[in-house]
């Protein structure tokens, strides 16, 4: 399983670096697609990928990327506040059907996936900032799976107190 994740991570890293070098609408379209797919996958884990709260979040992601495309990225926070307002109204109207955890996941999906990924569009490959965005993201995904996964045979703890010197 690790080798499949490693191989797919390398392929996706090559695609994203190529998109960063090309920039423009290619990068924008790829980031927009990755955001929507990531939100869909997150919501699928919680069984809410086709609910009203998920649709509100998908529409919020579209509005966020529209703000980024027309270079009004400062309005993202207003879009997110609007999403919170609409989600709260949706929660009150559809109360017995939705749990507060589903509404929280709908908000976190937009914030953690769509907004965070939209910031990559602002990085400039000529200034070599894309290294700082992708390299930690790659290692964040593969390193813990390799060294801290219960089936890896390596039972090291996450604590690194042995290396701290006063």
Image: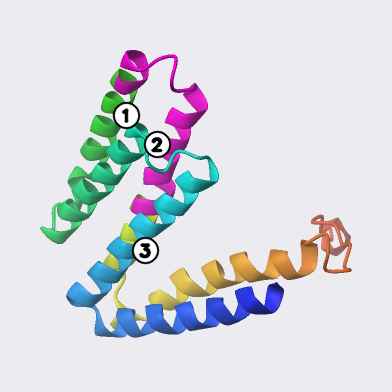
Disc 3 versus disc 2: distance between alpha carbons?
17 Å
Residue picked out by circle 3:
34
Quarter of the picture containing the N terminus is: bottom right
Is most of the magenta stretch helix, strand or loop?
helix
Residue picked out by circle 1:
84
Residue 104 falls within the magenta-colored stretch? yes
Say whether disc 1 or disc 3 marks the residue closer to the N-terminus.
3
Q: Is residue 76 left or right of residue 163?
A: left
Residue 146 falls within the magenta-colored stretch? no
Q: Nearer the viewer, residue 64 or 73?
A: 64
Quarter of the picture containing the C terminus is: bottom right
Of badges 1 and 3, nearer the viewer stands: 3
Evaluate if marks 1 and 2 touch, with contact meaning CB atoms under 8 Å apart: yes
Image point (83%, 68%), residue name = 152
State which region is magenta. 90-114
Image point (36%, 39%), residue name = 54
Say whether disc 1 or disc 2 marks the residue closer to the N-terminus.
1
Disc 3 element: helix
Image point (18%, 44%), residue name = 75
Say whether disc 3 or disc 2 marks the residue closer to the N-terminus.
3
Image point (31%, 63%), residue name = 33
């Amino acid at each position: 399983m690790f080798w499949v994740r490693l191989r797919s991570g390398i392929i996706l890293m090559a695609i994203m670096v190529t998109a960063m070098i090309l920039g423009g609408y290619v990068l924008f379209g790829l980031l927009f697609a990755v955001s929507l797919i990531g939100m869909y996958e997150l919501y699928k884990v919680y069984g809410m990928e086709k609910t009203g709260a998920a649709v509100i979040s998908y529409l919020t992601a579209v509005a966020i990327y529209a703000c980024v495309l027309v270079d009004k990225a400062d309005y993202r926070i207003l879009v997110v506040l609007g999403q919170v307002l609409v989600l709260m109204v949706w929660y009150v109207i559809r109360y017995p059907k939705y749990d507060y955890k589903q509404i929280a996941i709908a908000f976190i999906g937009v914030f953690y996936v769509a907004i965070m990924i939209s910031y990559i569009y602002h990085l400039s490959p000529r200034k070599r900032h894309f290294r700082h965005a992708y390299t930690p993201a790659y290692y964040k995904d593969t390193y813990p799976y390799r060294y801290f996964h219960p089936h890896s045979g390596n039972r090291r703890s996450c604590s690194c107190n042995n290396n701290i010197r006063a």
